[in-house]
Image (cartoon, helix red, strand yellow):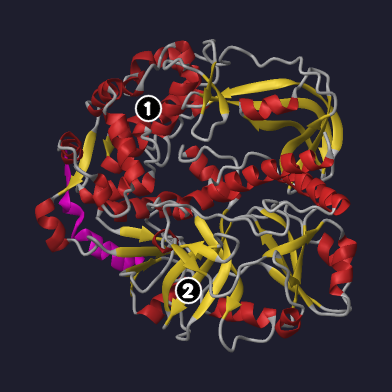
C-alpha cells in the first residue's frame, strides 16, 4: 500500500473513531489505538507534504448532535496540545510559574451566568465554534450552582464527569451498559430528554473563567470560581524553583475518584499566556502531559464468558500474570465479539498488555495474530448455544437466547432483592444462583415461599440456621413495601430509583392507579423527570405477557404502602417540596430518611439551591450546604424538629390499594 492510500485509510479510521467518541458517546477503539493512528498520520503528512481536506490533524473534533439546538461560543473552544515526554513539559515551563491540574476525562461544557443566575449550558460542539444547548439536562447535574453570589455576567468552562464509584452504582442498578464513565456522562448530558438518574450521579469541575475584567492569574480565577460555589479541578501552583519532574511524578491517577487521562500545565500569568497566541487546533498557553503506558509482554491463554441479566455475554481475555504499575493483572475485558475478532488470538500467542490511564487493564496488541482461538459456543451458566447479534451501534455481541438462563434470572432476582429495590438483605446474586441450582427458587414469587425449603436450606453448605433466619426475616419485612421499591425491582430498562420515586409521588404510591394509567395509554413523559425513552421502556415491559404474569404473582404476596390523596395537600408540609439532607442522624439512616421523604412526596437533592424548601440537618452538617441555606433563606430543620413535623403526617400512610 502506498503512502497516499495509507493516509486515506488512516483518515477514515480516525474520523469514524471521532464520530463514535464525540457524537455517539460510544468509543470503538482505545485511546492507545487512537493515539497510534494519529501519530502515524502526522508522520506521513510530514513525509509526503500532503494534507487532505478531510484530515483530522489540526482540527478540533466535533461533538455536535443533530437534534439539539446549536449555540455559537463567545470565544473558540480550542483543544490542548499534548505530549508524552516530561522533557517537553520542562521546556514549556522554562522560567515561568505554572499551574498543574488534572486532565479530566469527561464532556467539556460551558456554563453561562447572568445577574447571578444560571441561564445556559453549551457543549464544545462543532470545531469548538458552535456548541449544543444542553441547559435542560445540565441544570440537573448534582453540583451545578443555579445561583451564584457574583451578579456580573460570566462563563465557566469545565468538565462533566462521572466517578468510578458512581459508574459502579449505575452498573449495579442495570442502568448502564458501557465500560467508561465518560460515555455515561456524555450520553446523559447530550440526551434530548432528561435522565435524572444518571445526571444525579454526574459532577461538574470548572477549569476556566471567561469574564470581563477577570483576575490576572490562573490561580486567582480558580479561586473566584470556588468562591462562587463551583467545584474546581484539583490543581497546584508550581514555582520556578520547583523540581518539575518530581511534581509531575506525584500526580498519579491510581486511587483518584474520577477518570483522568493526563495532567495539564498552564502558565499562571493569563496575559502572558494569551500573548503566545494559538493555532487552529490549540492554544499555546497550555500543554497536556499524557502518561506513557507501561507495556508488558505475556501469553494469551483464552477467554472467560460472563452472562448478564440482559442475555448479553461479555468476553474477558485471560493471560499469564504480569505486574504493571505495581499491581498484578492476568485478565482484561474484551467486551464484545467485534473487539475480540480484531486481535486474531490463538492460545499461547504473545500479546502486549498495559493499564489505560494506569487503572484499567487492556490488551494492546497480539504480536502473532495466529487466529486459531475460537470463542466458546455455549452459555457458561445454562449451556444454551450462544448466538451473535448486532447492537444499535453495529457492534457484534455474544448473546444467550435462553429466557430461563440461571444467570439471567439470578441477576433479575438479585435486582429485585437489591437495597435500592425490595431491600431483602442476604439474597445476593451468588446466593440466589445457589438456591436456583438446588431448585428452591425459580422466580420472584418463590422468594416468599422459601420457608417450604427451610430444612433443606439450613442443612446445606454455606447456609445454616442463623443465615436462613436472617434471610427469612428480611423477606417477611419486604412484604410491606412502597410502589417505587417494587418498580425498581421489576427491572424495567432505565427505571432506576430516581425515576421510580417520581412515579411513586405522581400516583401517591398507588400501584392500582399506575397500572390503570398503563391500561389507559397515559403519556408518562408528560411527568417532569420521565423521558420519552423511559416511557417506551415501561410500555415495552408491560406489553410482555410473561412479565405481567410474573408481576401479578409476586404482587399477591405484597402489601403496598400508599398515601391518602385527600389529606396529602392539607396536613403534609413535605408534599411537592425540595429537600436536602445533611449530617448524621440518631434515629434515621441517611437512605431511610431519603426514602421517607420521597414517600411523603418530597423531591430530594444533594445540592442546596434557591429552589430548596427545607434543609434537614443532623450532627456535623456540611458547612457548604448550611452556608448556602442561610444565603438563600432556606428553612433549616433539626432532627428533633423533623420528628415533630413527621408526627403530624405519619397517619397519612395507608396499606393496600
Residue range in magenta is 638-656
Residue beneath label 1, please?
472
Residue sitting at the far left: 566
The answer to whether residue 181 is seen in the rendering is: no
Q: Residues within 10 Å of mark 2 (few under 14, many from 20)?
A: some
* Magenta span: chief secondary structure: helix
First in residue order: circle 2 vs circle 1: 2
Residue 589 x, y percent position in the rendering: 41, 53
Mark 1 burial class by Cα count in 10 Å: few <14, some 14-19, many 20+: many
Q: Secondary structure at mark 2?
A: strand
Residue at 43% over, 76% down: 628
Place of residue 477 in the rendered image (x, y in percent of width and height, measured from the top left): 32, 35
Q: Nearer the viewer, mark 2 or mark 1?
A: 2
Q: Position of residue 583 (x, y in %)?
A: 45, 64
Residue 287 or 627: which is nearer the viewer?
287
Quarter of the image where one finds residue 397:
top right
Label 2 close to label 1 by CB (< 8 Å): no
In-front residue for pair 453/75? 75
Numbered badge on residue 544: none
Q: Residue at x 51, y 80 (%)?
A: 154
Q: Which residue is mark 2?
A: 112
Amino acid at each position: 500500500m502506498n503512502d497516499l492510500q495509507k493516509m486515506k485509510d488512516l483518515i477514515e479510521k480516525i474520523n469514524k473513531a471521532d464520530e463514535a467518541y464525540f457524537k455517539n458517546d460510544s468509543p470503538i477503539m482505545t485511546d492507545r489505538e487512537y493515539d497510534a493512528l494519529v501519530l502515524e498520520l502526522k508522520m506521513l503528512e510530514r513525509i509526503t507534504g500532503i494534507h487532505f481536506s478531510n484530515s483530522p490533524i489540526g482540527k478540533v473534533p466535533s461533538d455536535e448532535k443533530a437534534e439539539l439546538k446549536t449555540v455559537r461560543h463567545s470565544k473558540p473552544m480550542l483543544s490542548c496540545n499534548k505530549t508524552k515526554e516530561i522533557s517537553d513539559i520542562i521546556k514549556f515551563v522554562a522560567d515561568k510559574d505554572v499551574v498543574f491540574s488534572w486532565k479530566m476525562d469527561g464532556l467539556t461544557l460551558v456554563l453561562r451566568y447572568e445577574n447571578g443566575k444560571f441561564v445556559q449550558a453549551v457543549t464544545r460542539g462543532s470545531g469548538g465554534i458552535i456548541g449544543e444547548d444542553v441547559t435542560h439536562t445540565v441544570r440537573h447535574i448534582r453540583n451545578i450552582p443555579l445561583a451564584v453570589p457574583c451578579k456580573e455576567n460570566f462563563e465557566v468552562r469545565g468538565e462533566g464527569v462521572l466517578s468510578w464509584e458512581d459508574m459502579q452504582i449505575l452498573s449495579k442498578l442495570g442502568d448502564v451498559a458501557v465500560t467508561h464513565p465518560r460515555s455515561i456522562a456524555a450520553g446523559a448530558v447530550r440526551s434530548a430528554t432528561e435522565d435524572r438518574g444518571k445526571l444525579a450521579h454526574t459532577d461538574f469541575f470548572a477549569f476556566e473563567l471567561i469574564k470581563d475584567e477577570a483576575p490576572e492569574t490562573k490561580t486567582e480565577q480558580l479561586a473566584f470560581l470556588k468562591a462562587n460555589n463551583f467545584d474546581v479541578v484539583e490543581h497546584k501552583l508550581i514555582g520556578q524553583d520547583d523540581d518539575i519532574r518530581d511534581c509531575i511524578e506525584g500526580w498519579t491517577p491510581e486511587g483518584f475518584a474520577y477518570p483522568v487521562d493526563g495532567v495539564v500545565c498552564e502558565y499562571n500569568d493569563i496575559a502572558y499566556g494569551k500573548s503566545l497566541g494559538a493555532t487552529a487546533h490549540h492554544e499555546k498557553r497550555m500543554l497536556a502531559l499524557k502518561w506513557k503506558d507501561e507495556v508488558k509482554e505475556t501469553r494469551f491463554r483464552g477467554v472467560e464468558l460472563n452472562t448478564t441479566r440482559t442475555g448479553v455475554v461479555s468476553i474477558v481475555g485471560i493471560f499469564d500474570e504480569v505486574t504493571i504499575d505495581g499491581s498484578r493483572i492476568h485478565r482484561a475485558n474484551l467486551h464484545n465479539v467485534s473487539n475480540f475478532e480484531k486481535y486474531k488470538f490463538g492460545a499461547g500467542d504473545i500479546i502486549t498488555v498495559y493499564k489505560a490511564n494506569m487503572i484499567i487493564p487492556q490488551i494492546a496488541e497480539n504480536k502473532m495474530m495466529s487466529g486459531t482461538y475460537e470463542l466458546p459456543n455455549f452459555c457458561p451458566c445454562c449451556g444454551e448455544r450462544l448466538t451473535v447479534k448486532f447492537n444499535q451501534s453495529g457492534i457484534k455481541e455474544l448473546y444467550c437466547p435462553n429466557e430461563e438462563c440461571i444467570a439471567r434470572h439470578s441477576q433479575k432476582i438479585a435486582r429485585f432483592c437489591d437495597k435500592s429495590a425490595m431491600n431483602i438483605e442476604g439474597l445476593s446474586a451468588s446466593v440466589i444462583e445457589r438456591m436456583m441450582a438446588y431448585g428452591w427458587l425459580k422466580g420472584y414469587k418463590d422468594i416468599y415461599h422459601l420457608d417450604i425449603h427451610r430444612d433443606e436450606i439450613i442443612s446445606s453448605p454455606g447456609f445454616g440456621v442463623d443465615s436462613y433466619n436472617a434471610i427469612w426475616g428480611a423477606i417477611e419485612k419486604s412484604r410491606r413495601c412502597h410502589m417505587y421499591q417494587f418498580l425498581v425491582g421489576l427491572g424495567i430498562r432505565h427505571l432506576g430509583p430516581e425515576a421510580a420515586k417520581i412515579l411513586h409521588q405522581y400516583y401517591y404510591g398507588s400501584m392500582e392507579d399506575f397500572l390503570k394509567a398503563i391500561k389507559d395509554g397515559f403519556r408518562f413523559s408528560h411527568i417532569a423527570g420521565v423521558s420519552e425513552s423511559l416511557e417506551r421502556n415501561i410500555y415495552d415491559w408491560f406489553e410482555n405477557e410473561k412479565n405481567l404474569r410474573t408481576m401479578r404473582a409476586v404482587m399477591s404476596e405484597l402489601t403496598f404502602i400508599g398515601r391518602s390523596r385527600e389529606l396529602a395537600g392539607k396536613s403534609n408540609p413535605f408534599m411537592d417540596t425540595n429537600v436536602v439532607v445533611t449530617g448524621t442522624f440518631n434515629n434515621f439512616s441517611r437512605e431511610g430518611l431519603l426514602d421517607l421523604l420521597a414517600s411523603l412526596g418530597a423531591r430530594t437533592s444533594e445540592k442546596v439551591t434557591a429552589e430548596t424548601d427545607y434543609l434537614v440537618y443532623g450532627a456535623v452538617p456540611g458547612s457548604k450546604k448550611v452556608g448556602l441555606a442561610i444565603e438563600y433563606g432556606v428553612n433549616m430543620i433539626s432532627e428533633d424538629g423533623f420528628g415533630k413535623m413527621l408526627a403530624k403526617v405519619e397517619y397519612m400512610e395507608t396499606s393496600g390499594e
